[in-house]
Amino acid sequence: MRTAKDNLHLRLFSLSRTWHIWLGLIAVPLTIVLSLTGIWLNHRDLFSPGAAKPPLQGLLTTDTAVKQLPVTLEQALGMARHEWGVVPIEKIEVLESQGRLVYKIMPGSGRELFVDAHSGSWKKVDGYRIREGADDQKPKPQSINWNRLMKDLHTGKLAGTPGKLVYDAVALALIVLAGTGLYLWALPRWKKRRRSP
């Protein structure tokens, strides 16, 4: 004859199975998205040729004469002003990229302008769009910023705050899924061990 404790365990087991099945079905699509975008982010050099950083050549040191570069910071800021008008700048970096010194100008909101300090060629990143060009050439056709797109898809940032909240809810569902799965696995073993002499 079943005791009240046995009935409670049976109800918990049934409830855990139901939660486990439904949360598993809900979590499957997002788990696939997280897995695929995670693989992309971990191995972006395989999916985006040229994304791997070449070794530094030591162009930027504590002895670099930044004021004597062919393209000055003022000229790079002038290019940024031409692109965006007069806007506040969140950050400016001078960095070595693919064997060249580059100014990276960031006014925020996912916008960036990279200006080659030697040639004046530029790359403008605006959210998920990229444009490249040089003063003496017609700009290249617009392309997609796959790395940023995959990163924002992976974190839920792509859909703004609602996207992040959906990802948070699915993360909690995965925690419950793991807990109910552990419970479903452990309870029969515990009962069997308790019954054995």
Image: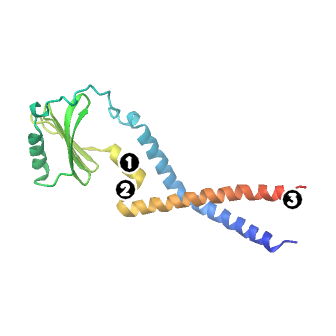
Disc number for residue 114: none
Please identify the residue farthest to the right as the structure is shown.
197
Circle 2 Cα neighbour tier, 10 Å, few/some/many (<14 / 14–19 / ≥20): some
Q: Earlier in the sequence, mark 2 or mark 3?
A: 2
**As drawn, 163 above or below 107:** below
* Residue at the image point whose x is 41% and y is 42% from the top: 41
| Amino acid residing under circle 3 | Arg
Dividing the picture into quadrants, the one containing residue 197 is bottom right
Residue at which label 3 appears: 195
Q: Nearer the viewer, residue 68 or 117?
A: 68
Q: Are marks 2 and 3 in contact (CB under 8 Å)?
A: no
Q: In terms of secondary structure, where does tag 1 sit?
A: helix
* Residue at the image point whose x is 47% and y is 50% from the top: 34
Q: Given this view, does label 1 or label 3 mark the residue nearer the observer?
A: 3
Left or right? Give the position of 75 relative to 132.
left
Q: Are marks 2 and 1 in contact (CB under 8 Å)?
A: yes
Residue at which label 1 appears: 151
Circle 1 Cα neighbour tier, 10 Å, few/some/many (<14 / 14–19 / ≥20): some
Dividing the picture into quadrants, the one containing residue 190 is bottom right
| Amino acid residing under circle 2 | Lys
In the rendered image, residue 4, in percent from the top left (x then y), is placed at: 80, 74
Q: Earlier in the sequence, mark 1 or mark 3?
A: 1
**As drawn, 179 above or below 68:** below
Please identify the residue farthest to the top as the structure is shown.
57
